[in-house]
Image: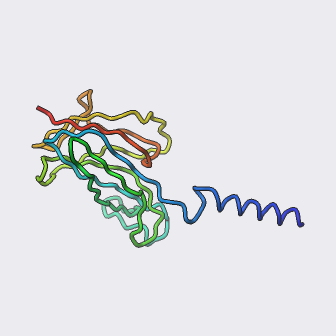
Amino acid sequence: MLHRILACLALVAAAGSHPLLAADAPAPVLHLHGSIDPALSYSAWVEYIATDRRSECSFDDAITGMRAPLRRQIALEPKIGAGRHDLRSPLEMTEAPACAWRPVALSLCVAAPGAETSRCEPLLLYRPDEHTAEAPLAITCSAASGQCEDQSGHPPQRLVADLRQDLVLDITASR
């Protein structure tokens, strides 16, 4: 019996020191940075979905007639200057109700500096089964329309297994 108690105490002590299990572990951070054309600026949105199945974490979807998880968006503003941008944000949702929020997408809203963005496009989409390389991403955007594309001329969406990452993003203006 004493062996079991000691084993349980050792397991609890180890769990408390593990960064993913510790109650006081820092929130995971998204870090987006790189070069940006002076003709452009952007804001970003992180979309969260409730993973808790309690009724206060879902709503009646009138279109499907089913219960659907709540979704929330949080606006993020990068630091932009001298041809560089830097956005750091903890990926935690503290909004009530406490619904075990998980980040599922990061969207960029690109425009000319000082202009209001009218178009936001998904850039990173969370897919837990994806195993993509975290290579730098280069996109070209129109200051007038806010539309962006990657080097292949396609929408610059990347599926990622984890939004908590350090991603180099270089943004140039279309000519």
Residue drawn 26% across the image and 56% down it: 77
Q: Quadrant of residue 61?
A: bottom left
Q: How is the image coloured?
A: rainbow
Q: How many marks?
A: 0
Image side of residue 52 versus residue 33, left or right? right
Above or below: residue 166 compared with residue 135: below
Residue 105 placement, left or right of 82 = right
The residue that appears at 26% across and 27% down in the rendered structure is 152
Check the image and name the residue furthest to the front: 82
Quadrant placement of the C terminus:
top left
Task: Look at the picture and state if 132 lies above or below 72.
Answer: above
On screen, residue 78 versus residue 67, left or right, reads left
Taking depth in this image into account, of 17 and 74 the one nearest to the observer is 17
Where residue 164 sits in the image (x, y, percent)?
44, 49
Q: Position of residue 89 (x, y in %)?
A: 37, 55
Where is residue 76? Give x, y as percent: 29, 57
Q: Nearer the viewer, residue 81 or 74?
A: 81
Q: Position of residue 115 (x, y in %)?
A: 11, 52
Above or below, 132 against 98 in this view is: above
At a point 15% along the width and 41% down the height, the residue shown is: 38
Left or right of 69, for residue 76: left
Towards the viewer: 3 or 63? 3
